[in-house]
Amino acid sequence: MKKTIKGNLFNRIEKLGNKKYVHVGFEDKDKTFGNLLGSFVPEVGMKKKVKLTIEILDN
């Protein structure tokens, strides 16, 4: 399976309860966080070998 999706990588602080975490993630134009990666492993416990290629598009 191969998918090409344009979006944005982000690096931000997320707060869960009393703890803060650095969250590096991806969002597409519809702000659907994680759907890209989740589509490759849709079931809990699923594991697949992948090759990721990221191209930076300057604005």
Image (cartoon, rainbow, N blue to C red):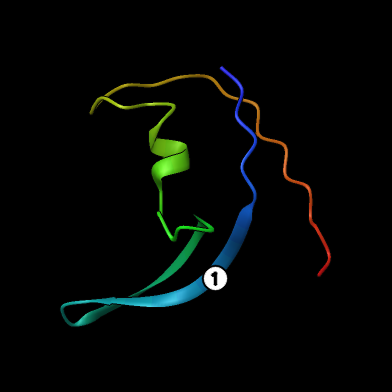
Residue drawn where x is 40% and y is 31% of the image? 39
Question: Seen in the image, is 22 located left or right of residue 16?
Answer: right
> Which quarter shows the N terminus?
top right
Indicate the quadrant containing the C terminus: top left, top right, bottom left or bottom right: bottom right
> Against 20, is 53 above or below?
above
Tell me the SS state at disc 1: strand
| Camera-side residue of 45 and 32 | 32
Where does label 1 land, which residue? 11
Q: Position of residue 8 (x, y in %)?
A: 61, 61
Q: Label 1 is placed on what type of residue?
A: Asn
Quarter of the image where one finds residue 52: top right
Asked whether 21 or 31 is in front, the reply is: 31
Residue density around tag 1, few if under 14, some if 14–19, many if 20 or more, within 10 Å: few
Q: Is residue 3 above or below residue 48?
A: below
Left or right, 4 with respect to 55, comes to left
- Which of the 4 image quadrants contains residue 14? bottom left
Residue 50: image location, x then y, percent? 58, 24
Q: Nearer the viewer, residue 36 or 13?
A: 36
- Residue at 41% across, 55% down: 33
Vertical placement of 17 versus 56: above or below? below
Residue 49 pos. (x, y %)? 53, 19
Eyeballing the image, is 30 above or below 15? above
Which image quadrant is residue 54 in? top right
For the point 46% across and 19% down, the residue is 48
